Image (tube, grey):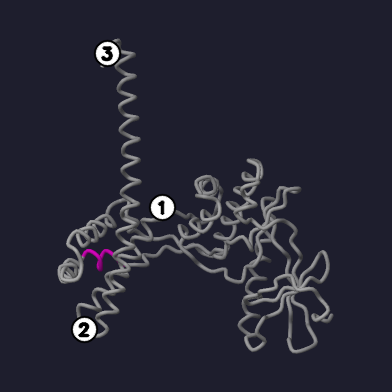
Amino acid sequence: MNLDNLKILNPRPRESIVYIEDDNFIIKAPVYHDRFGEWFKKQVDAKNIIDKLHKIKSPHYNIPHISLIKYRGKLDYVMRESRIHGEHLTPEFIETLSAEDTEAISHGLAHFCNDMNQLYPVKWEKDWDTASELMRERFDRIVKLLSKHFPEKDLDIILDARNFIKSPDGADAQQCYVFSHTDFNSGNLLYNRDTKTLSIIDFAESKYENINDMFEKIGSYFGGTPNIMEIYKSLPRAQPVGNFHTDINALHLRKHLLRFYNHAWAWSISDRHEKQRIEEIRHHMETIIKLFGLIKAKQNTENLKNKNQIDINNINKLYHSGRTP
């Protein structure tokens, strides 16, 4: 085999150059030969993951087969991968899909994520110890010190957001970490209309991630994940998963609050790089205020819906009882 004689499938590669061997196979080789060891480890890890998934024999999604082949030349090995046929799930392509196609993709992704998540132990971690950091008196003291740089109304919102994080809706609880593909994008997700099959490729970035971050990435391509998440929740599994937050803004708020705290604390104990630190604090404050505003707006909408439903129920009760409101 001579790679120079093969057509390149991806003209602007990041890590792997993909060559078309024939209609059934592609060949992957590293872009940078001096990083062969790093590239090769990723490919071997990806092969091990894919081999485990093939043993499940799921009918709901398709993944490639991978083999290592010895290559004579500057490289010790290249990867031969079965070629996946289908259209990439770009936003434009998704808009053309029928309800049946969308349902097949939803089931495929839900089953794929569940199988990936169960390959390795599910982890439960309190990744950001907000109980000991954000609720300390130190947080309040730092906010007071910042009053000479920021409007009081903005700082009040920061305190309100901090208090919200400790509420039941605030995402301040043990987080569920699962082994995941982590690289969902239109380049790695394909769909075949004829076979109604979802295919997933490129497992080189697979690792642990927060289960809510996983669903957020999926949602970025499908305008939300309610259907996929509900299918996923209903699937059988050996290891429990949980702590789902449909409002991903609560998770982002939590992260930015701690980043705000870290920068503000560094600023409060040293005047070095003060201008830069203040700008970093300003950036996180603006993000926190925006996220908290989105969360409150959603809560207000839901509260109004609930109130209207209660009013309707009360009117129905009065009507059926023979009384008028």
Is residue 88 found inside the magenta-colored segment of the image? no
* 186 lies left or right of 242: right
Q: Residue at x 45, y 57 (%)?
A: 212
Disc 3 vs disc 1: Cβ atoms closer than 8 Å?
Answer: no
Q: Quadrant of the C terminus?
A: top left
Disc 2 vs disc 1: Cβ atoms closer than 8 Å?
Answer: no
Question: Label 3 sits on what residue type?
Answer: Thr
Residue that carries the numbered disc 2 in the rendered image: 271
Mark seen at residue 297:
none
Q: Residues within 10 Å of mark 3 (few under 14, many from 20)?
A: few
Residue 192 at x, y = what percent? 72, 52
Q: Which residues are magenta?
A: 129-135
Residue that carries the numbered disc 3 in the rendered image: 324
The image shows residue 259, relative to residue 103, as above or below, that is: below
The numbered mark, 3 or 1, whose residue comes first in the sequence reads 1
* 53 lies left or right of 235: right
Alpha-carbon span between mark 3 and mark 1: 41 Å
Q: Residues within 10 Å of mark 1 (few under 14, many from 20)?
A: some
Q: Secondary structure at mark 1?
A: loop
Q: Secondary structure at mark 3?
A: loop
Q: Residue at x 29, y 59 (%)?
A: 289
- Tell me how many marks there are: 3
Q: Residues within 10 Å of mark 2 (few under 14, many from 20)?
A: few
Residue that carries the numbered disc 1 in the rendered image: 245
Nearer the observer: mark 2 or 3; the answer is 2
